[in-house]
Image: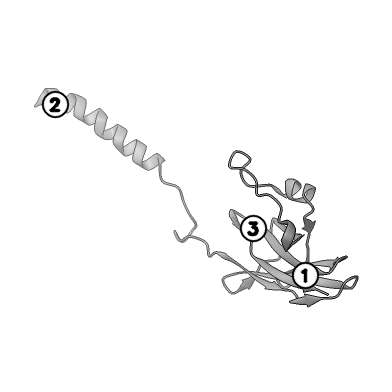
């Protein structure tokens, strides 16, 4: 029995240390943070050469989020959807999105972010918001018909 205790005790201590080091605190209450919600607020229709407001309302729980890390709008004619990044490229960061024509939105308060945009040609356009807040990222999209 004495020989077993000699190797068992250090093994038990090692297991306890390893399990204690692997604990990560999620939040002070131990709960996961609520997901961010994005409500698209833009017209279904617009006129050529008239400025429109493209807006989103960003909330987390019942509270507006005015300090998102990044909010951008990517806009394209539905006939010319941009190629998605390859698996090797992974998710695009804000600078890469801007290089592909995304427009950075500004916070106007109460969780609302906005871009003023003028459509130059008639057609059906896809407007996709790219929102990053903390570790959360979402990319809702809608269509706008321009006449």
Q: State left or right for residue 88 relative to residue 108.
A: left
Q: Residue at x 69, y 55 (%)?
A: 69
Between the C-alphas of marks 2 and 3, the distance is 53 Å
Q: Which residue is mark 3?
A: 133
Q: Residue at x 35, y 36 (%)?
A: 17
Q: Tell me the crowding category of disc 3: few under 14, some 14 to 19, or many 20 or more residues within 10 angstroms, Cα based.
A: some
Q: Earlier in the sequence, mark 2 or mark 1?
A: 2
Where is residue 10? Give x, y as percent. Answer: 26, 28
Where is residue 20? Give x, y as percent. Answer: 37, 42
Q: Nearer the viewer, residue 17 or 109?
A: 109
In this view, 118 is above or below 81: below
Where is residue 83? Give x, y as percent. Answer: 68, 49
In this view, 91 is above or below 62: above
Q: Say what secondary structure mark 3 lies in.
A: strand
Q: Which residue is mark 1?
A: 54
Where is residue 95? Give x, y as percent. Answer: 75, 46
Between the C-alphas of marks 1 and 3, the distance is 19 Å
Instruction: Give the residue furthest to the right.
Output: 49
Instruction: Give the residue furthest to the top.
Output: 3
Does the rendering let one see residue 118?
Answer: no
Q: Which residue is mark 2?
A: 4
Q: Earlier in the sequence, mark 1 or mark 3?
A: 1
């Amino acid at each position: 029995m004495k020989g077993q205790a000699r190797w068992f005790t250090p093994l038990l201590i090692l297991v306890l240390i390893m399990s204690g080091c692997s604990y990560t605190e999620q939040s002070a209450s131990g709960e996961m943070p609520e997901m961010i919600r994005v409500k698209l607020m833009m017209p279904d229709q617009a006129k050529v050469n008239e400025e429109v407001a493209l807006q989103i309302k960003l909330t987390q729980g019942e509270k507006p989020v005015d300090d998102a890390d990044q909010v951008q709008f990517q806009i394209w004619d539905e006939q010319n959807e941009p190629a998605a990044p390859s698996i090797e490229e992974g998710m695009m960061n804000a600078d890469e999105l801007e290089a592909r024509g995304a427009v950075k939105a500004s916070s106007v308060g109460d969780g609302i972010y906005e871009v003023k945009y003028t459509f130059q040609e008639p057609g059906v356009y896809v407007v996709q918001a790219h929102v990053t807040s903390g570790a959360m990222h979402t990319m809702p999209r809608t269509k706008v018909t321009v006449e």
